[in-house]
Amino acid sequence: MIPSMRRAKRPRPLGDLPRNWADLGDGPAGLIAELALANDVADYVRFRAVCRPWRRCSPDPCAGGLNYRFLPRRWIMIDKAVAGPRRHRFLNVSTGERIHMDILEFAQHKLLALTPEGLLLLLHEPTLAARLLNPLTRQLTDLPPATALFTPEQHRHRALGFKTELDVTGVGLFVAAATADASTVSVAISFCRPRVIAVAKPGDESWTVVEYDEHMDSALPFAGRFYCATWKGVMVLDMGSDEQPPRLQMVADRREAFFFVHMSESLHLVDNGGELMLVHRRMRRNHYVEFHRQYDAYKVDLEAGALVRAKGFNGRAVFIGMHRAISVSAQATFLSVKADTVYKCGVRTEAYNIADGSRCGRITDAEVNFLAHCIQGVGKQLA
């Protein structure tokens, strides 16, 4: 029969149509993949897990090195789950969603730190190989070995068979050039012993070491750059040029904003929903000559090079530990988390409201306490 002379078929009811979602085609499926990735990388991973045709029409997140598009920025590892020795819970700090995943890499690696981008900094102790793990995409990125980061004393201890520790105070990604593709993304790690910042790109053979003299309270990647808080103020890592070596450069002098006592006070940088802020933890004496902790918040005005006093966190809450600080959506995470409140994580969790100065001396809510535990904990305490 000539095709043009065929009798048109009556359209079938919608309920009778076959639904082969794998045959969506590269166009529609690719558009859905982009929408899923724009919402959350976890949704993108779930989309690619459905079938092979959908994976063909969406880029592999494990290909092409460290790509900003596939970083699990909203996710943090919070604690171990009961189901298995290497199963951990992860929390989305924007929505409150929680998922469980097995981190099999912990069998061969030691956990050094968690990055603000949601990555895990791992160390293979027998070879001192450093790696970054994306727990959602399972991408494992090789970094230069940590051999050059040990002090001579630590090398002697290793030669005698003793374990040596790398005390990481901050780690994150920053952009070493004008564009944020995989070839320009670098990793910066700050250590308190020795006092150095180590910088490298995936594929480098060794670390570039930036020494500093001041005690560093906090280090944080923000908007493609790597910032540090010292007693002088907020500084940024400047990679320099062929003529100038890498160095820390002042971007917001603290001395105009408040008085600081190094031995009893601390500074904490935090990305508060896309705004760089500094929390000053200090001692204060009341009328009864009793000392207690008080917390002041400042917006870091990078254009003016100043710290501007703030009376809240725009409805969010901030958890601070010894070296880490995170900002969470007060409504999305836990009902018991209060807005504009600092939660100090330690032996016990304490809360201080930035807006009105009220405090809660002891937090008994279990969910708040386990989130506080993961912020306070470092390395093997979490793994």
Image (spheres, rainbow, N blue to C red):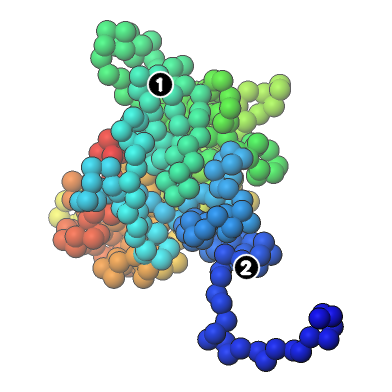
Q: Can the viewer see residue 70? A: yes
- What type is the residue that disc 1 sits on? Leu
Q: Secondary structure at mark 1?
A: loop
Q: As rendered, which of 23 and 262 lies closer to the eye?
A: 23
What residue is at 34 percent from the left and 60 percent from the top?
Answer: 98
Residue 183 horizontal/vertical position (percent): 65, 36
Name the N-terminal-most of marks 2 and 1: 2
Residue 50 horizontal/vertical position (percent): 49, 60
Please tell me in which quadrant of the rendered image residue 315 appears: bottom left
Q: Secondary structure at mark 2?
A: loop
User: Disc 2, disc 1: CB below 8 Å?
Assistant: no
Q: CA distance from mark 2 to mark 1?
A: 46 Å
Position of 361 relative to 168 (above/below) = below
Q: Can the viewer see residue 267? A: no
Q: In which quadrant is the C terminus drawn? A: top left
Q: Is residue 346 left or right of residue 170?
A: left
Position of 124 relative to 150 (above/below) = below
Q: In which quadrant is the N terminus drawn? A: bottom right
What residue is pinned by disc 1?
128
What residue is at 20 percent from the left and 51 percent from the top?
Answer: 82
Q: Is disc 2 surrounded by few (<14), some (14 to 19) or many (20+) residues within 10 Å?
A: few
What residue is pinned by disc 2?
24
Position of 58 relative to 5 (above/below) = above
Farthest front residue?
1
Q: As rendered, which of 46 and 239 lies closer to the eye?
A: 46
What residue is at 34 percent from the left and 29 percent from the top?
Answer: 108
Q: Is residue 377 left or right of residue 228?
A: left
Q: Which mark lies nearer to you, 2 or 1?
A: 2
Please tell me in which quadrant of the rendered image residue 248 appears: top right
Q: Is residue 236 left or right of residue 272?
A: right
Q: As rendered, which of 323 and 56 lies closer to the eye?
A: 56
